[in-house]
Amino acid sequence: MKTSINFKGAKSDSEIHNFRKKSFDYIRKDLTPKNEYWMEQKIADRLQKIEAYCKEKSGRKLQKNAMPLREAVVVIKEDTTMLELHNLSKRLEKELKIRVFQIAIHKDEGHYDKDSKEWKPNYHAHLVADWQDVETGKTLKHQSFHYSQMQDITAECLEMERGNSNTGIQRLEAVEFKIRKKEEELKNLEEKYNEMKSEIKSKKPEELIVKESDFLGFQKIKIEKTVENYKKALKVQNTKLVKNKTELESKSKQISELSTKIEGLKQEVDFLKNKSSVVLTNEKAFAFEKKKYLDSVQNTLEKTIKFEKLNPNLKIDSHERMLQELNRIVEKVALKNNIPLDAFKEIYKDSAKLAHLFTILRFGERKSISSENNEAENNRKHRFRR
């Protein structure tokens, strides 16, 4: 299954659709609880902030035809997690300066097959992004190769093409099973094909001859009816032969394609096994992969806390209450993203990271965004001085 990401100008009513703020006739309401949502800021608030920042940096208003807010629909798998989408957002920001501030995972859209009446889900996610260049205040400018890069980043972050070692092995086994099934079908077709050819060869011509008795009782061949029988027999057999030949060629082609695919998957699994071996035996590689994973978990946890802070009913009135809320959010993130609790224990061991989580939980989004903007501005000034 392949993924794709395509950004277009965000609409003012995107939040109504993305966050299911009203009912739609094209969704399955029984599947809506499976959707997931994350928001750092509302579209209207973000647009206001962008316009003010543009005026501050460039001295001019944002152009009327500019598209400072854009939305992408991303094709995902049934088990794609918010953690993976946060990792995708982080890569888009790091490599293309695109800052995602809203994510909605939809699992309640699709259609029923006309013939089989089977439900065909359309798993996808909506990413709403800030398209403003923080260095100039203007809208980001990307070239064609940047959009190609977006596709590469998306496929890599969502593991739609290569997956992890377990996924690769499962896919490999699935393809091998398909090949065996196709080979069985091919064998049966070949047997049927050969049987039909033998049947034609063994067919006795006299069985097709039509004889009738005349008024004297003598048997005479009816030429017209006999010729007609031969024509019908040949037509039926030729039709069957052509059909079976076409099916044989189709099955052979499918087996060839599956064989090519299985070779690619074998190479993929070998690569992942080698990578796993390196990670397990090389301390530096293991430390790098571990840090990379824990950073992504930390990032998702922080974003989830910020989203939870948008809830007006969330009350943090004591240190004990803060611990309870943090543990609740951790359990939620772990469950939704299949993250082992040991990963969070590792994060808790770092007092600076734990203090940062408490800060976000206590003071919320505003202080965090302010510190991020200050950091971005300091980085920009540092680059300028160099």
Image: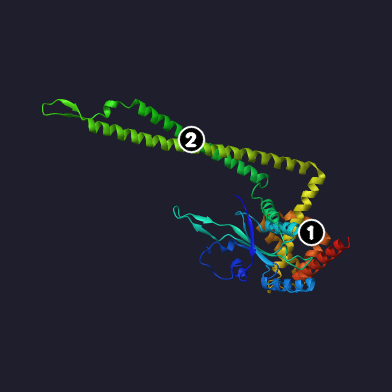
Amino acid type indicated by mark 2: Leu
Looking at this view, is 167 or 135 the one in front? 135
Determine the residue located farthest toward the right in the rendered image. Answer: 385
Amino acid marked by disc 1: Tyr
Q: Quadrant of residue 272?
A: top right
Task: Give the residue at mark 2.
Answer: 186
User: The C terminus appears in which quarter of the rendering?
Assistant: bottom right
Q: Which of labels 2 and 1 is toward the front?
A: 2
Instruction: Kindly identify the residue that appears in the image at 36 percent across and 29 percent down.
Output: 200
Residue 64's quadrant in the figure? bottom right
Quadrant of the image occupied by residue 17: bottom right
Mark 2 neighbour density, 10 Å: few (under 14) some (14–19) many (20 or more): some
Q: Determine if residue 320 is in view.
A: no
Left or right, 12 with reference to 289? left
Task: Please name the residue shown 64% across and 66% down the image.
Answer: 9
Residue at x 64% of width, y 46% of height: 167
Q: Position of residue 350 (x, y in %)?
A: 82, 58
Measured as percent of width and height from the top left, residue 207 is found at 27, 28
Residue 279 % position (x, y):
77, 44
User: Compared to 179, does 342 lie above or below?
Assistant: below
Q: Relative to residue 203, is residue 381 drawn left or right?
A: right
